[in-house]
């Protein structure tokens, strides 16, 4: 029980940031992002950019897996589509659309293409669930990469060798440093999270959860399983498409191998660790998934001072830690870090009146 | 309103429905009764669209809806509750009830992502409407924020009725609404059902084993036995019907 419910209108009761700790959290998060943009060193900026892009993609994965209850191991495919669509758009429309506007059109274009791909890849979800759907989406991941690598698309995608990517430019402001790109990434990541949060305050998101919880009950209330599942896939893929666009802008070159099954697994792992079907799940999940291997790397560097034997066992150790993390969460905290945070927040909210 | 014509349905060798025909009169409560396994729930499933009958038609408001998917039938104004409560267990009472209003709401994906503006206006209007027409009406204000899985059985049944009412249905189908309830809960539920009929003029279809309830509140009774319709008429005549007495005594013995 939350102490002191003093709400006086339904509007106040429908608010999301319904206690001071949540407001404080949001406030410090925004402050933190500003701090990184202003004072972070190159290393911090690099990690923060990677995290921001991941958060957007994992938010997408969360929509379909966490909220709609549909398994997917193919979301790296949508990230690939977003990334390649951005580059192809820049190359095709480069002379036609002015540079300052190109990015503003390319990103929505990439998002839209990814959403369409999401609808196609989501089609099997109308017939199959669980493991079968996981395999179907996994195949979609392979097919997307195959199409990107094949010789017929190589003139646009660069095939196996990859392709150089453009610099984003917002109305004449060329974002040619990582610090500048961080501002774009952080802004879009925050917007993406807010969008997702909003989604689940309305009929659209509620329908997703309804299907996850009990599909025949959803149907009896007039929720079309077909339309709703495909909408979920489209939104989810759109998020990954956005992540892909930012990915393309952030790295100098993109390659098909960056979007393989391993990335799909990483996205799913992040949401398992962070908390499925929870708004902050992607944020906490990505922080852990990126930080743990990083921490191992850094501490090894300090320990070994570059010793060759230690460096040899670092990579496998990172993977073992990654695996152990996921298994650990599945076993001990299946609702992820968000659940742990919730418990802490509830305790804080009650303090000093009660504990536990 | 609703008419069922010569419905046949079988599962392999089991004949769940064998030529069921009746019409539910607008604004009235029609009961479907019969011993266990008589085919009452199967009939409901055929009406709401989960089972496709082998033969026969389901007519709603003069329209043949036999081939429509369940969600399309819901859009037309058919709501139901389930024999084994089928709420969204992870959600609060309020969210469950809000879902009932899904087809009446209009917000699209872009409205939803933005929230402020159209979606918010719609949500606040919905909240006010639900508070008054459902939560106050069913006297569940004290539990609106509770997760449904934490509620006692009787209240869950009431919330499920609330979710159906949020649809503002024209036809409300209740599959054993008082099964497993004590005397007091049963009386409450009977009162709510009568209130729904009276206040909203809803046509109601009721499957129930509680004969007192059926005889008290229904104007028409359809009796099934092994999938066959053995009687149909006002409660007083059905109660005296030889085939009905035989079916019930046979089932009891
Ligand atoms: N999906 C199904 N698959 C196979 N058989 C089914 C299915 N649904 C119902 N039946 C069978 O159809 C017959 C009628 O079942 P139904 O559930 O409609 O009875 P009922 O009148 O609702 O009984 P009760 O009073 O116990 O709820 C039973 O023999 C049942 O086993
Ligand atoms: Mg039944």
Image (cartoon, rainbow, N blue to C red):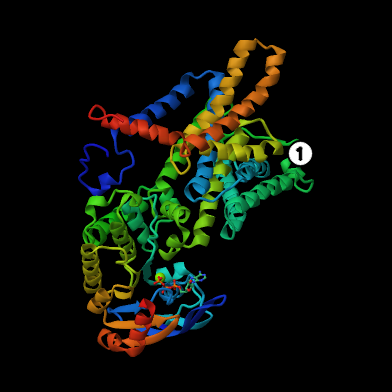
Q: Is residue A352 above or below residue A245?
A: above
Is residue A82 toward the left or the right of residue B196 in the image? right
Q: How many marks?
A: 1
Whether residue A1 is visible here, answered yes or no, is yes
Is residue A340 toward the left or the right of residue A52 in the image? left
Q: Chain of mark 1?
A: A
Is residue A119 toward the left or the right of residue A335 in the image? right
Q: For mark 1, give the secondary structure.
A: helix
Q: Residue at x 40, y 46 (%)?
A: A198
Q: Nearer the viewer, residue B222 or A85?
A: B222
Instruction: Give the x, y percent position of residue A247.
Output: 60, 35
Q: Nearer the viewer, residue A116 or B5?
A: B5
Q: Is residue A290 above or below residue B31?
A: above
Q: Residue at x 40, y 73 (%)?
A: B36
Residue at the disc numbered 1: A160
Q: Residue at x 68, y 41 (%)?
A: A91
Is residue A90 toward the left or the right of residue A65 in the image? right
Q: Residue at x 35, y 78 (%)?
A: B32
Q: Residue furthest front?
A: B253
Q: Is residue B68 above or below residue B150?
A: below
Instruction: Give the x, y percent position of residue A151.
Output: 79, 46
Characterize the local packing of mark 1: few (<14), some (14-19) or many (20 or more) Cα atoms within 10 angstroms.
some
Which image quadrant for residue A298?
A: top right
* The C terminus of chain A - image quarter: top left
Whether residue A177 is visible here, answered yes or no, is no
* The N terminus of chain A - image quarter: top left
Which image quadrant for residue A349?
A: top left
Q: Nearer the viewer, residue A165 or A305?
A: A305
Instruction: Give the x, y percent position of residue A309.
Output: 71, 15
């Amino acid at each position: 029980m939350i102490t002191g419910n003093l709400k006086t209108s339904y509007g106040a009761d429908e608010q999301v940031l319904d206690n001071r700790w949540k407001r404080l959290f949001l406030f410090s998060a925004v402050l933190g992002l500003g701090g990184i943009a202003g004072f972070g060193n190159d290393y911090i900026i690099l990690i923060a950019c990677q995290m921001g892009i991941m958060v957007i993609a994992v938010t997408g994965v969360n929509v379909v897996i966490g909220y709609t209850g549909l398994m997917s191991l193919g979301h790296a495919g949508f990230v690939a589509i977003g990334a390649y669509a951005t580059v192809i758009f820049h190359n095709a429309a480069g002379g036609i659309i002015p540079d300052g506007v190109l990015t503003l059109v390319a990103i929505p274009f990439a998002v839209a293409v990814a959403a369409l791909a999401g609808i196609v890849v989501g089609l099997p979800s109308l017939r199959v669930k669980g493991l079968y759907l996981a395999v179907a989406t996994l195949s979609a991941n392979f097919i997307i990469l195959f199409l990107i690598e094949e010789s017929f698309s190589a003139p646009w995608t660069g095939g196996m060798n990859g392709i150089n990517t453009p610099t984003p430019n917002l109305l004449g402001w060329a974002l040619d440093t990582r610090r500048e790109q961080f501002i774009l990434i952080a802004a879009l990541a925050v917007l993406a999270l807010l969008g997702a949060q909003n989604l689940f305050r309305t009929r659209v998101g509620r329908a997703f959860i309804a299907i996850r919880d009990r599909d025949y009950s959803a149907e009896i209330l007039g929720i079309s399983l077909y339309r709703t599942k495909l909408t979920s896939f489209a939104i989810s893929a759109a998020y990954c498409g956005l992540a892909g666009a930012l990915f393309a802008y952030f790295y100098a070159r993109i390659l098909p191998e960056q979007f393989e099954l391993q990335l799909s697994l990483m996205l799913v792992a992040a949401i398992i660790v962070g908390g499925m079907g929870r708004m902050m799940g992607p944020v906490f999940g990505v922080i852990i998934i990126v930080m743990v291997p990083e921490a191992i790397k850094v501490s090894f560097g300090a320990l070994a001072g570059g010793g060759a034997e230690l460096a040899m066992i670092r990579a496998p150790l990172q993977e073992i830690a990654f695996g152990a993390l996921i298994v650990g969460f599945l076993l001990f905290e299946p609702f992820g870090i968000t659940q742990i945070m919730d418990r802490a927040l509830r305790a804080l909210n009650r303090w000093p009146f009660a504990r536990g | 309103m609703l008419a069922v014509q010569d419905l046949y349905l079988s599962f392999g060798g089991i004949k769940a429905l064998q030529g069921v025909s009746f019409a539910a009169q607008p604004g009235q409560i029609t009961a479907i009764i019969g011993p266990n396994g008589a085919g009452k729930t199967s009939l409901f499933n055929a009406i709401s669209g989960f089972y496709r009958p082998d033969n026969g038609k389901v007519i709603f408001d003069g329209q043949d809806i036999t081939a429509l998917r369940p969600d399309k039938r819901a859009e037309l104004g058919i709501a139901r509750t389930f024999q084994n409560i089928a709420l969204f267990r992870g959600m609060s009472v309020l969210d469950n009830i809000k879902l009932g209003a899904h087809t009446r709401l209009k917000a699209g994906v872009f409205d939803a992502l933005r929230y402020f503006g159209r979606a918010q206006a719609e949500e606040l209007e919905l909240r006010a409407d639900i508070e008054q027409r459902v939560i106050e009406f069913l006297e569940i204000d004290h539990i609106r924020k509770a997760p449904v899985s934490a509620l006692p059985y009787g209240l869950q049944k009431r919330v499920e009725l609330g979710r159906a009412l949020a649809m503002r249905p024209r036809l409300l189908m209740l599959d054993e609404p008082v099964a497993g309830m004590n005397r007091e809960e049963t009386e409450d539920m009977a009162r709510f059902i009568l209130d729904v009929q009276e206040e909203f003029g809803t046509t109601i279809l009721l499957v129930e084993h509680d004969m007192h309830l059926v005889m008290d509140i229904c104007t028409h009774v359809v009796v099934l036995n092994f999938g066959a319709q053995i009687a149909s008429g006002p409660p007083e005549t059905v109660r005296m019907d030889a085939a009905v007495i035989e079916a019930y005594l046979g089932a009891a013995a």
